[in-house]
Image (spheres, helix red, strand yellow):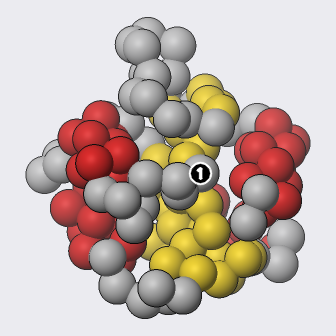
Amino acid sequence: MSEVRNRVLVVEDHADSRELLAEFLEALGYEVDVAEHGQQALERLRGAPRPAVMVLDLMMPVMSGWELMRYVREDPALRSLPVVVVSGAADAHPLPEGILGAVNKPVDLDVLRHFLREATRRC
């Protein structure tokens, strides 16, 4: 499956946060796709083109970030996908396995930019 090096999937259930993250990432030159919850993100990840990195909220309806990560890590085609958690719960709970980094809400955009640069360098 094709992967686009500068493509980011933002998974966030709050519309305002999702829109602000997408605008910030687009201003940095990333192609951005969005999903409102984990189930929608999983559908996007199994489609083409696949993102180079996923920015993931943990606490969402339908399918949480923890549930989504379980599917991602069990799927050989998705297992190596870099993931940056952006969540108010980043400090409150153990993070899912395989997370590149975590940014608490409110989001420190410089920290997020750093993690995205690291993720896209690995591609």
Residue situated in front as seen by the camera: 102 or 100: 100
Residue situated in front as seen by the camera: 84 or 104: 84
Please name the residue shown 81% across and 49% down the image.
Answer: 118
Please name the residue shown 33% across and 65% down the image.
Answer: 41
Count of marks placed on residues: 1
Pointer 1 residue: 82
Percent of width and height locating residue 85: 54, 38
* Residue farthest toward the left in the current orientation of the protein: 62
Image side of residue 48 versus residue 69, left or right: right
Q: Does residue 76 appear in the picture of this structure?
A: yes
Percent of width and height locating residue 28: 85, 70
* Residue farthest toward the front in the current orientation of the protein: 76
Please name the residue shown 34% across and 52% down the image.
Answer: 72
Q: In which quarter of the view is residue 101 placed?
A: top right
Q: Residues within 10 Å of mark 1 (few under 14, many from 20)?
A: many
Q: Amino acid at mark 1?
A: Pro
Residue situated in front as seen by the camera: 113 or 72: 72
Image side of residue 59 versus residue 7, left or right: left
Q: In which quarter of the view is residue 69 placed?
A: top left
Percent of width and height locating residue 51: 55, 73
Residue situated in front as seen by the camera: 71 or 44: 71
Q: Quadrant of the C terminus?
A: bottom right
Q: Is residue 36 above or below residue 112?
A: below
